[in-house]
Image (cartoon, grey):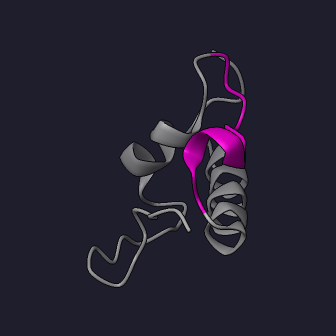
Amino acid sequence: MTKSIFNKDNEYLINWKSVLLLKHFVTRFGNIKKRKFTKLPVKHQKKVRKAIINARELGLIPYIR
């Protein structure tokens, strides 16, 4: 079992408003990083993906760089 940065001790908020946190999960080309590289559980990876998509639609994160 791998450690997640979104555990009960840290309690990061995964939403579209936390742009600096979401940029860690986007490659330099603008793609969303895979679970293999982020080491997140499925539940958190899905939340991160949804938050990145919402932030892109609102113009907070670019689609491509």
Q: Say which quadrant the N terminus sits in.
A: bottom right
Q: Which residue is drawn at 66% across and 61% down?
A: 45
**Does the segment drawn in magenta span residue 32?**
yes
Q: Where is residue 12 in the image (x, y as percent from the top left)?
A: 36, 70
Q: Say which quadrant the C terminus sits in.
A: top right
**Number of numbered markers:** 0
Instruction: State whether the magenta stretch is mostly helix, strand or loop.
Output: loop
Viewer-proximal residue, 45 or 52? 45
Q: Position of residue 24 (x, y in %)?
A: 46, 39
In the image, which residues are magenta? 29-40
Q: Where is residue 64 in the image (x, y as percent from the top left)?
A: 70, 20
Q: Residue at x 69, y 49 (%)?
A: 35
Q: Which residue is drawn at 37% across and 44% down?
A: 20
**Does the segment drawn in magenta span residue 44?**
no
* Up/down of 65 relative to 40, above or below: above
Q: Where is residue 37 in the image (x, y as percent from the top left)?
A: 61, 38
Q: Which residue is drawn at 57% across and 51% down?
A: 39
